[in-house]
Amino acid sequence: MSTMAMPEKIESADKVGSVSAHRYEQIVAELRTIVEAQTRGQFTIGDYALEIEPMRE
């Protein structure tokens, strides 16, 4: 997974793509929350799978 540094605040742009800078920040914040939840879910699934079927030597 690529980790690109995203500016926390868009200072000089009125628009980012087709949306306002404010709306862009709202969208990015929501997407970060969704990705965090998905990541937690994937680890939870993996943990339960290992509990059911432990890795063999």
Image: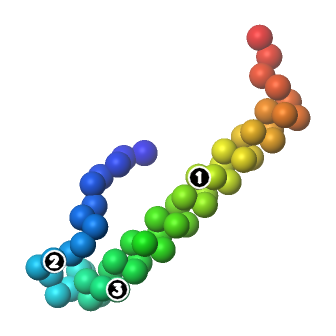
Q: Give the crowd class for mark 2: few <14, some 14-19, many >=20 residues within 10 Å.
A: few
Question: Residue 55 sits in which quadrant?
Answer: top right
Give the distance between the C-alpha atoms of the residues marked 3 and 1, in whole angstroms. Answer: 24 Å
Q: Amino acid at mark 3?
A: Arg
Q: Are marks 3 and 1 in contact (CB under 8 Å)?
A: no
Q: Vertically, is 5 above or below 43?
A: below
Q: Earlier in the sequence, mark 2 or mark 1?
A: 2
Q: Secondary structure at mark 3?
A: helix
Q: Amino acid at mark 2?
A: Glu
Name the disc covering residue 11, or none.
Answer: 2
Residue drawn at x 85%, y 30% as measured from the top left: 53
Q: Amino acid at mark 1?
A: Thr
Give the distance between the C-alpha atoms of the residues marked 3 and 2, in whole angstroms. Answer: 13 Å
Q: Earlier in the sequence, mark 3 or mark 2?
A: 2
* Rendering coords of residue 40 (x, y %): 63, 52
Q: Earlier in the sequence, mark 3 or mark 1?
A: 3
Quadrant where the N terminus sits is top left
| Nearer mark to the viewer, of 3 and 2 | 2
**8 or 24: nearer the viewer:** 8
Quadrant where the C terminus sits is top right
Q: Give the crowd class for mark 3: few <14, some 14-19, many >=20 residues within 10 Å.
A: few
Give the distance between the C-alpha atoms of the residues marked 2 and 1, in whole angstroms. Answer: 30 Å
- Residue 14 seen in the current view: yes
Question: Residue 19 sits in which quadrant?
Answer: bottom left
To which residue does mark 3 refer? 23
Q: Give the crowd class for mark 1: few <14, some 14-19, many >=20 residues within 10 Å.
A: few
* Rendering coords of residue 42 (x, y %): 66, 49
Residue drawn at x 59%, y 52% as measured from the top left: 39
Q: Vertically, is 23 above or below 51?
A: below
To which residue does mark 1 refer? 39
